[in-house]
Every structure is written in structure tokens, then in C-alpha cells.
Image: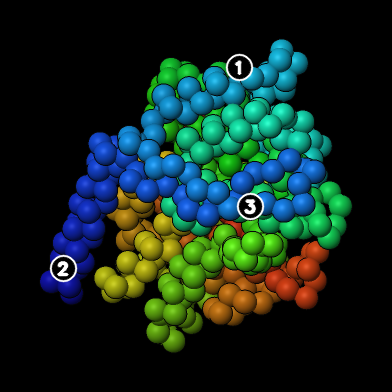
């Protein structure tokens, strides 16, 4: 057993080194490729969202880039609009997010539908600068979630990419503490910065209905497929005995730590200890985390994933319902010293014959940058 554990630690050190190289490369050389087929954020009057390709950058995004984009956006606004965007970084403002189409009754910030085309372009540039460059993750995933709301808006009222809100909690700067706060139905993005560093990338709530669709140009979208497929592969990699150990007695109709449930992490971790798994199985756990971690800029995402890898021996995986992740109540969780990820299947709300997905990514220590005690 000692030799086996030594081998596992050696293998994990190799993966950590690879991640560290990836982070350094991202910082030094930047992302070589940006999003292909990223759906554009449209105002509420738009009936469909087309694909867009973002030009590749020559250097990695830094907090200074995010601050510059934020200030450029603010410069497009009049005084009243700036007052809607620039808010205090308080617990009440930071936790004002929801998975419901409840508009300004549950959110803070300026509504995208009230912006001009040039202002909307500048607002999108802030979010793009702050988030990852992967396909179906980061900025690409966010734009697809908004596009899904436009699809819903064609069938039901109250939905649409214009019904999303952007706020800066605190003053965007490379000194001091502030948060990029953006969201609407099925999306809550909370990125916290402190003294020019990314201090927290959670909570990140993301859901989608419909789970997949094809637009008028024939482009297909499935923005949470990578998340579902990663969790599915993780569960498929378990033996029947391991699946039995990972199975929870509770049933879940939604995520446990959604809006309003800040700090309510279970006192005891449940399910199957990742320390009991083989190297290959542990890699599947790490791979399953990645689509959530990749919401952040590429350098931060690589660093965060490396941290979560170092904590794998104290991490647990669990599920409820079926491990197929295709029916109401199918649920899966990853719970570590830092990472907390949930994914659940629910019956459709607008498309009642289909399921739709809810998921949340939190961190036990750095939700909202660790600024509040819950």
C-alpha cells in the first residue's frame, strides 16, 4: 500500500507540474486561441442569437485588462447609469443573485436591455476580459446561456438576454477590493479582485433550458454538455461497489447550495473518498471539475485546478438518483476542502417534455473572495 500511495503522489505531482507549466505559459504567452462560435449577447428585442468568433489575443488577460475594460464601459454611461453600476461591495449586494427570471427584484446593477449597442459591446468586453477562453466554458458558455434565454423568450414571456444585470461592487482598480457581479436567469457570475489579484471566482451558478438547440443558421449549442459529460465519465469510471459507496440516501430536486444558501456547506462530507480511487479515476474527478473552474481567466483557472488537485485525497464524490444524469432528480456532487460542485437534472419549466440542468460551483473558503462570514 505504501508503494501504491507513493506512486499516486508521484503521479499527482506530475499533473501539478503540468498545470503549473500551463499557468505560466498562459501568463507569459496568453491564449493562442479564443472562442469559436460564441453566441453574441443580444438586447431583449432580439429573437435569436448568432455565433461570433473572438479574435485571439497576444497576451494573457490580467486584472489590469479587466479594470481597463470596466473603465471603458463606465465611460460610455451617463451619471445615472453609472450610479446603477457602481455599488458598494456589501454582503447584501454580493449575494443578490438568483436562478429565477426575477429581474431587478432579486438582482443589482444595470439591465442589459437598457444599454445602447455601443454600451452593450463595452459591457460584453468586461465579461470577456474577466473569464476563460475555452469552448463551452468561460465567456463562450456565458454567451450561450444568454442565447438560451433568447430561445426561451420566443416561447414564454419574461426571458431574454436583455434581462441580465451587470454591476461593479466597489471601484474597479488594481488596488483595493471589488467584485464583477453579473447575472440573470440561469446565471450568476461573481469574480472578486483584491490588490490586483483574483481573490475568488465563486459562487458561479449556471443552468440551461433547453439543454441543446440549433439556431436558424444550423449552428448547434449545448453549453453544459462538457459539465454533464465530465460528471458522467467520472461516475462511469467507478465499479459497482464504488457506486454503491458514493450513492446518497437523500434525493435532490435542485442544488443544495443555490441562491440564499451561502455558507450552508454540510458539516460532514458524504459519499466516496477520492483517496480510495486509482490514479485514472482521480484524473476523471479532476477532469470533471475543470469546466466549472474554467469560468475564470485561463491563468487563474490553471492555478485553482492545481490547488484542487493537491486536495484530492480529502475530496469526496457522491450522487443521488441515477448515475445516467438524464432524468429528474439525477444529482452529482464533488466536495473537497475548497471545491464544491453540484449538478442536477430537473424537469423542464418551459419545455415540459424535456429535462433542464442546474449547477453551482462554490469554494468553502473563497466565495465572494472570502469577504463575508456566513
User: In front: mark 2 or mark 1?
Assistant: 1
State the SS at label 1: helix
Give the label on residue 50, or none: 3
Q: Residue 117: image x %, image y %?
A: 68, 32
The answer to whether residue 225 is left or right of residue 326 is: left
State the SS at label 2: helix
Q: CA distance from mark 2 to mark 1?
A: 55 Å
Give the label on residue 210, or none: none
Q: Residue 221: image x %, image y %?
A: 59, 63
Query: What is the quadrant of residue 151 in the picture?
Result: bottom right
Give the label on residue 7, or none: 2
Examine the rendered structure and indicate whether residue 307 appears above or below residue 241: above
Examine the rendered structure and indicate whether residue 368 appears above or below residue 304: above
Q: Nearer the viewer, residue 153 or 195?
A: 153
Pointer 3 or 1: first along the chain: 3
Which residue in the structure is indicated by mark 1?
75
Q: Residue at x 37, y 61 (%)?
A: 286
Q: Is residue 168 visible?
A: yes
Examine the rendered structure and indicate whether residue 44 appears above or below residue 221: above
Q: Nearer the viewer, residue 188 or 6?
A: 188
Q: CA distance from mark 3 to mark 1?
A: 27 Å
Amino acid at each position: 500500500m505504501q508503494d501504491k500511495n507513493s506512486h499516486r503522489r508521484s503521479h499527482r505531482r506530475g499533473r501539478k507540474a503540468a498545470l503549473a507549466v500551463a499557468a505560466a505559459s498562459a501568463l507569459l504567452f496568453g491564449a493562442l486561441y479564443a472562442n469559436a462560435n460564441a453566441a453574441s449577447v443580444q438586447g431583449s428585442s432580439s429573437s435569436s442569437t448568432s455565433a461570433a468568433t473572438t479574435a485571439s489575443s497576444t497576451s494573457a488577460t490580467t486584472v489590469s485588462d479587466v479594470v481597463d475594460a470596466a473603465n471603458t464601459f463606465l465611460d460610455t454611461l451617463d451619471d445615472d447609469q453609472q450610479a446603477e453600476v457602481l455599488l458598494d461591495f456589501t454582503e447584501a449586494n454580493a449575494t443578490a443573485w438568483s436562478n429565477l427570471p426575477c429581474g431587478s427584484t432579486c438582482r443589482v446593477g444595470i439591465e442589459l436591455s437598457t444599454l445602447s449597442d455601443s454600451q452593450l459591446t463595452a459591457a460584453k468586453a468586461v465579461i470577456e476580459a474577466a473569464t476563460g477562453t475555452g469552448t463551452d466554458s468561460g465567456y463562450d458558455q456565458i454567451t450561450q446561456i444568454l442565447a438560451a434565454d433568447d430561445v426561451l423568450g420566443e416561447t414564454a414571456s419574461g426571458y431574454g438576454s436583455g434581462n441580465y444585470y451587470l454591476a461593479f461592487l466597489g471601484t474597479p482598480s488594481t488596488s483595493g477590493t471589488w467584485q464583477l457581479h453579473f447575472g440573470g436567469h440561469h446565471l450568476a457570475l461573481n469574480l472578486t479582485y483584491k490588490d490586483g489579484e483574483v481573490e475568488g471566482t465563486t459562487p458561479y451558478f449556471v443552468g440551461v433550458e433547453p439543454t441543446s438547440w440549433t439556431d436558424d443558421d444550423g449552428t448547434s449549442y449545448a453549453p453544459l454538455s462538457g459539465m454533464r459529460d465530465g460528471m458522467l465519465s467520472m461516475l462511469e469510471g467507478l465499479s459497482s461497489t464504488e457506486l454503491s459507496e458514493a450513492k446518497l440516501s437523500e434525493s435532490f430536486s435542485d442544488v443544495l447550495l443555490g441562491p440564499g444558501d451561502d455558507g450552508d456547506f454540510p458539516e460532514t462530507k458524504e459519499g466516496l473518498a477520492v483517496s480510495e480511487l486509482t490514479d485514472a479515476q482521480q484524473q476523471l474527478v479532476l477532469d470533471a471539475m475543470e469546466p466549472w473552474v474554467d469560468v475564470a481567466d485561463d491563468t487563474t483557472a490553471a492555478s485553482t485546478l492545481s490547488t484542487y488537485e493537491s486536495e484530492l485525497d480529502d475530496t469526496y464524490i457522491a450522487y443521488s438518483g441515477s448515475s445516467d444524469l438524464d432524468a429528474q432528480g439525477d444529482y452529482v456532487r464533488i466536495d473537497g476542502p475548497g471545491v464544491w460542485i453540484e449538478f442536477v437534472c430537473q424537469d423542464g419549466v418551459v419545455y415540459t417534455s424535456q429535462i433542464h440542468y442546474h449547477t453551482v460551483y462554490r469554494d468553502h473558503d473563497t466565495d465572494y473572495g472570502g469577504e463575508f462570514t456566513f
